[in-house]
Image (cartoon, grey):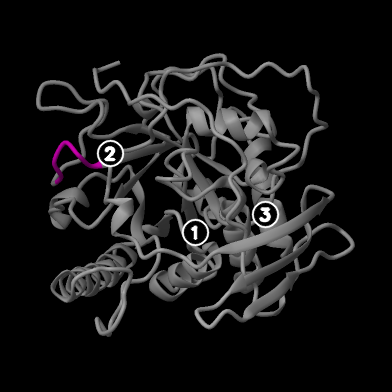
Amino acid sequence: MKRLAAAGALLLAMPGALSASDLEPWRKPENAIVVDAYELNEIDWPLMLTDKRIVGFISKASDGLPESFNCKGDHDGDTVAHCKTMWRKYAVSRELYETRRLLAKAQGLLWGAYHLARPGNPVDQANHFLDYAKPQPGEMMVLDIEGIDPEQYMSLADAQVFAGHIRARTGRYPVLYTNHSTARYIAANRDKYRILSRLPLWYARYKPGIQAVFPLGNWDNYALWQFSAAANCNKRRCPYRVKGTLNDIDVNVVPVNRSELVKIWAFGDLLPEKPFDATDEIRVDEIVTASINRGAADEEPKSMPVKIAAETIAGVVAAASASVQNKDGGAISGTIASSANGEPTAAEGAVTPAAAHPGTDPVTPLNYQNY
């Protein structure tokens, strides 16, 4: 745990690292490049690996709730044929994940995995992610929140439960991947989202600089910056071309070299919490979508109704009593507890998370024009 505690401090204290005033930091040859991909990204691995600046690979792992293997009986109104198709897709993507992991680690790349968060039970989704990704102690874990509309994405209240459950099972918190609009909303409401607002930030912004963006709530800067994606890369112009990939590959910069990145890669701790000031001004930005749509939320199974009441102490969930109705009308309940220092502890009994929506912020489509 001492190693984990030192990682966050090292990232923020490193001389010259993560300077928000830097323009196009990916042009600096000493800065590490990290590629992230989902199952439909085509990759010529031998060619990609000729780029020695690429030191890490983050793969999409799980997506929402797990698929049904049985495909019998009632599975939320889905047809048996579609159920079987989705299971085959899931099985193939999981094997692809494992294959890419073996390739990347065999070539000395740092490895990470992300969960694309959807509406639905966040504890089930957290367990799904851990079962799918099987993260090792030195691997990055990421919670991907694409927006704050709870009809399309996991609600921020549920996202806190997800992060806390990952911490309870692994001893580490995940990194938070999101766009500026969502990060701004979380930062402006960091007295309410005291876990999310302290997760290391993997920041998506498809512009050449981030002047006047940070500090943003508890975030003095980004942990990773996703600067290139299908949104701003085409055949004529691209911030950074990765050999052996198409224009839709996501590329990230970390303003430290490989040796320094190795020390902080797994992350796992919460960032220090700053005093909340209601007069804080959060810069408005037009970039609101972190990445292209990677699946339909309506394909996810519906989660069971959930009710939860929670209080917070020292910036984390202090106590949460949850109850849900099972199909027979019975109640299932559990408790999420907090230790004296405010860190969530393992739950007693079966924990069922919140499904309450914390409120919405107007969301507009991403402008896909080049910056």
- Please determine whether, in this image, residue 275 is positioned above or below residue 318: above
Q: Which residue is mark 2?
A: 292
Which residue is at 62% across, 58% downward? 354
Task: In the rendered structure, find residue 141 and report the number of the disc placed on it.
Answer: 1
Nearest the viewer among 187 and 36 is: 187
Find residue 269 and name its label.
Answer: 3
Marks 3 and 1 sit apart, C-alpha to C-alpha, by 12 Å
Quadrant assignment, res 128: bottom left
Category of crowding for the residue at label 1, using alpha-carbon neighbours closer than 10 angstroms: few (below 14), some (14–19), many (at least 20): many
**Furthest-left residue in this view:** 235
Are dots 3 and 1 in contact, CB under 8 Å? no
Disc nearest the viewer among 3 and 2: 2
247 in the magenta segment: yes
Sequence-wise, which precedes: disc 3 or disc 1? Answer: 1
The C terminus appears in which quarter of the rendering? top left
Disc 2, SS: loop
Instruction: Give the distance between the C-alpha atoms of the residues marked 1 and 2, in whole angstroms.
Output: 20 Å
Q: Quadrant of the N terminus?
A: bottom right
Residue 147 higher or lower than 97, as above or below: above
